[in-house]
Image (cartoon, coloured by chain):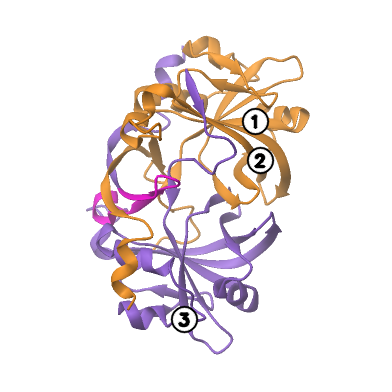
Chain colours: A purple, B orange
Amino acid sequence: MRKSFGAKTMAYPAPVFIIGSYDENGKANAMNAAWGGICSSNPPCISVSIRAQRKTYDNIVEKKAFTVNLPSSEHIAEADYFGMVSGRDVDKFEKTGLTPVKGEFVDAPYIDEFPVAIECRLHQIVEIGVHIQLIGEIVDVKIRQDCLDENGQPDIVKIDPVLFTPEIRHYLKFGVKAADAFSAGKKFME
Amino acid sequence: MRKSFGAKTMAYPAPVFIIGSYDENGKANAMNAAWGGICSSNPPCISVSIRAQRKTYDNIVEKKAFTVNLPSSEHIAEADYFGMVSGRDVDKFEKTGLTPVKGEFVDAPYIDEFPVAIECRLHQIVEIGVHIQLIGEIVDVKIRQDCLDENGQPDIVKIDPVLFTPEIRHYLKFGVKAADAFSAGKKFME
C-alpha cells in the first residue's frame, strides 16, 4: 500500500548548494539553492534553479559566472541563513563573517571556509516555470587540503557535507557506506 | 590551501534515481541516473540527464513519461545493477526479481519494492552535451505506507534512501540530522 502525496517536490537527497556571485559593482553575494545537481559529464556541467527575482540571478546573467560551494555540517547555520534573506537587503558575508575569495578562473567568489568550491562559467539558461535553470560548465573544483585523504583524493568524512530533505525540511549529514558503485550490482550478472 | 581537481563532476550529494520507462511494446526498463534533481517548484519538475544511446532515452521520448524511483539501502545492489547493463541486452526486472507496476497517471512503470515512486510527464528536453536533460513534470509522489511516520508524513529513516558520491564512487546511507532548515540560520538575523 502506498500513500499519494500529489504533485510535490519530494525527492531525496536534494543538495545544499551555496551559489557565489558578484554583482555589477563586484560585491559578493551567496544564496542557498536546493534545486540542482550535475547534469552532464562532457562538458562537465552543473545546474542550479533560481527564481528570476533573486539577486543571484541578475548577478549570474551579468557576469556569466558563478561558484557552487558545499558547506560542511559545521557551517550549516550560515548555509541556512544564505537561503533566508536577500542580497538586495543585506551583506550576507558581513553578517556571517565568512570570506569571499575571487575565483581563479571565473568572475565569481567562492567561500574560503567551505571545503568544496566549484567554479562555473554560464553555459545555458533554461526557462522552466517560477524557477529558471542556470547550467554552468565546471571549469575547476577546489577542495581544501585538510579534506583530502592520504592519496590526495577527496575524503567525504573530512568534507562532512550536508544534504537537504524537501518537504521534511531537515539538513542531514552523510551516513555510512552502503556499497561500492559499479560493483555491488555484479551479483546479478553472469 | 586547496587542491585543484580541474573540470570534474565532483559535487556531493548526487542522487540515486532509478528511472522507470516502457518501450513501444510496453516492456518495462529501469536505469540508474546520478545526474538529476528537482529543478522547479511550480510546475513541480525533476530533471534527469541521460545519454541518447540509452534505451531509457528512446522510451521516454516515445511515451512522454517516466518514473523516478528511490531505492532504500536494502536494494542498493539492484540499483547498482540497473546502471551497469542495458535494457537493450537484458530484462533487468527479470534478472533482479523486482516488480514493475504500471503508473497510475503516466505510461511508465514504478518499482513496487522501492519506498518512493515519482510519476512524471515529459515537460522539456534540453540538449547539453553527451547527456540530454529530460525534465519531467511531477504528477504524483507515492510513498509506501510502512515508510510514513505516525502523522502520515514521510519518515526518512524508514525510507532509508541512498546517495552517490561521484568520482569517489560510493553509495552512502543518509546520516543524522544536522539542523532544521529555515531555522538554523535565524541566529544571523536581528
Tell me residue A52's x, y (percent).
64, 68
Q: Tell me where residue A84 sits by quadrant.
A: bottom left
In this view of the protein, can residue A41 be seen by the observer? no
Q: Are marks 1 and 2 in contact (CB under 8 Å)?
A: yes
Question: What residue is pinned by disc 2?
Answer: B136
Identity of the residue drawn at 60% across and 64% down: A51
Mark 2 and mark 3, same subunit? no
Q: Which is nearer the eye, A141 or A38?
A: A38
Q: Can you tell which mark lies on residue A28?
A: 3
Quadrant where the image shows the N terminus of chain B:
bottom left
The residue type indicated by label 3 comes to Ala
Element on which disc 1 rests: strand
Q: Which is nearer the eye, B17 or B128?
A: B17
Element on which disc 3 rests: strand
Element on which disc 2 rests: strand
Quadrant where the image shows the C terminus of chain B:
bottom left
User: What range is drawn magenta here?
Assistant: A154-172
Q: Give me the C-alpha separation between circle 1 and circle 2.
A: 8 Å
Q: Can you tell which mark lies on residue B66?
A: 1
The residue type indicated by label 2 comes to Gly
Q: Residues within 10 Å of mark 1 (few under 14, many from 20)?
A: many
Identity of the residue drawn at 43% across and 43% down: A13
Disc 3 chain ID:
A
Q: Is residue A98 above or below residue B67?
A: below
